Image (cartoon, grey):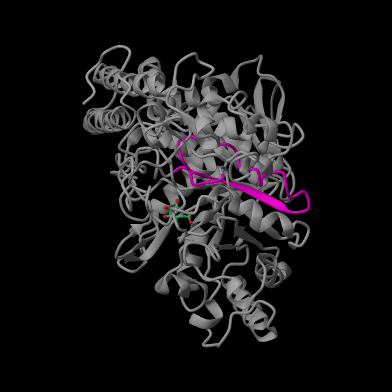
Amino acid sequence: MQGVDPAWLPDEVFRPIGTRRTLVRGSGPLVDTVHEEVTRACARFGGRVERDAAPGPYDLVLEVTGTDGSEAFTCERADGRTNVTATGPSGLLYGLFHVVRLGEDAFREDLPRQTHAPALALRMLDHWDNVAVHPVMGQVERGYAGGSLFWADGRARGDLDRVRAYARLLASCGINAVAVNNVNVHETEARLLTDRIGEVAALAEVFRAYGIRTHLSVTFAAPLVLGGMDTADPLDARVRAWWARATAEVYAAIPDFGGYVVKADSEGQPGPFAYGRTHADGANMLAEALRPYGGTVHWRAFVYDHRQDWRDRSTDRARAAYDHFVPLDGEFADNAVLQVKHGPMDFQVREPVSPLIGAMPGTRLAVEVQATQEYTGQQRHVCWLGPMWSEVLRFPVQEGLPVGELARGGLVAVSNAGDDPYWTGHPLAQANLYTFGRLAWRPDADPSQILDEWIRLTFGTAAAAGLRAILDGSWRTYEKYTAPLGVGFMVQPGHHYGPAVDGYEYSPWGTYHFADRDGIGVDRSAATGTGFAAQYAKPWAEVYESPDTCPDELLLFFHHVPYGHVLHSGRTVIQHIYDTHFEGVEEAEEARRVWAGLGDVVDAERHARVAELFEEQVRSAREWRDQVNSYFFRKSGVPDERGRRIC
Ligand code: GCW
């Protein structure tokens, strides 16, 4: 598409296929998509493609043998050609993109026979897109990539070419589900469920061609706000009948509709509490409506008191999801998925894994991460989240089982894409979208290999070393110059960009650091604190309980310690704060310098865009450094051991 960045699918990556002879065998819309992809590549590079012809002298045979829902494919080399076979059409699509990723290697005689299948059946992006521009949150809540890809001027975009290009990008990294509107469902968006379902159906049609099912965020109060009823009580037969009818109409419009996403009793959204019902009652009502059609309800576990008294030290937001949901284990329908944020707070740069994950063996659970960089630089800073997500997914939170295995309901990311020409605002933030898809396919994959893959596809080889240097450590760099040792927040209230150490300290949101002249951190131990640490299974409950065993990077999440407390690293907390903030800025400056040196190997426009963003990143990193260091110097009165300038 003209004017749109091809991201990790530039024409060039199709050359190895486009110069060869390919046979595509099988029928159905996804096979058509595969055929179109190869046809386009051949038109550009001079190769040939046949559809369903008899076996002949082909270099590549892409064949689907059945119509099942399997997403697996096998790739092998035999008799001088490469064969990709799948029993289901989506498997063939993923097989094609596998060959694209391999490039020339796909045609080597020593290509090993391999079968690939996704570890997680649901690999989903949630868009926090509003249909009507919201007076505070804009078109895309926490969006840093321009407007919405789906909605503009109060309705679905008429021209869906861009959505088609997006669907293609998503499929190529393995994503198979999308929720097209914000979980905060405002008045206009509520109607997507009923009289405006046609707009959702138009999007679903585009996504379908790339094996992606469409989901919708709905408001729990729909029977009130759309149905004119006087209650939304999930146990009321009339309410249930309303949802059954509404859902039947959704499926009439979108036969392969994925299901509903619900944020209930969370940050002001309506929910079952108003009727004295439980979250299982609420979720099961929707599950029942969706069941006849094979749909799923994604019920979010982000339920906490956002109007707490900051002077009340016994209330701990980190505890909330576990306290609310664990007692309901076993009560959720099997087509209800509890969608849990990966950490107990809210997408901070460093959090422990949520203790809820693995604590509900009788409940299907999906894990939610945030690709949109609300708290990680808002796509003005380079912050590749691959290592963070990988740490989360590999973390053995429950009886040695990693999060990636416990997330039986799937992996979900809040999307970072918008109508920005580079899709993600910061061109390098595309790496997060790509990495998410690949990790959802294989949660135990090595993120640095995924990064290399993204760099090679997107930029070729000339810029690879520089890009790797810039991206690989960028999450840790960001962590260094922002909130220290897992304590979180310290951001400007509302928009969450830039430093404000006490920005949320005297607020009702439950996000505090409790710094005083003697020390800092939140005591979440069972012995003397909020007891949050005891929500973990063994060994983590013990590990987190004591500052002696708690990992440094999470110390202030779990403990309130004096500034002179000595970390496992050998440094005091206060010296750690000073050192990391100086280091973080130096690393950001170094990344800027490396990028400047890539001017000859990256196209001029992209180079200029990133160079400009690096100016902002370095400015902002210095601001963080200076405010955080000064704040703690003034609180503690402890000078920097190395005598650097702190005011
Ligand atoms: O992180 C917070 C965001 C809200 C968001 C909420 C949520 C969609 O600041 O903007 O609302 O999380 O996850 O529901």
| Residue 134 visible at all | yes
The residue shown at (60%, 56%) is 301
In reply to whether residue 368 is colored magenta, the answer given is: yes
Q: Quadrant of the N terminus?
A: top left
In reply to whether residue 301 is colored magenta, the answer given is: no
Which quarter holds ligand 1? bottom left
Which residue occupies the foreground of this view, 51 or 129?
A: 129
Residue 451 image position (x, y, % from top left) = 48, 26
Residue range highlighted in magenta = 344-371
Left/right of residue 38 with respect to residue 357 in the rendered view: left
- Dominant secondary-structure state across the stretch colored magenta: loop
In the rendered image of this protein, does residue 278 appear above or below residue 102?
below
Left/right of residue 622 with respect to residue 25 in the rendered view: left
Left/right of residue 218 with respect to residue 76 in the rendered view: left
Residue 223 image position (x, y, % from top left) = 56, 81
Figure quadrant of residue 249 = bottom right
The residue shown at (71%, 43%) is 358
In the rendered image of this protein, does residue 313 appear above or below residue 569?
below
The residue shown at (65%, 43%) is 355
| Residue 55 visible at all | no
In the rendered image of this protein, does residue 438 appear above or below residue 190?
above
Residue 237 image position (x, y, % from top left) = 70, 84
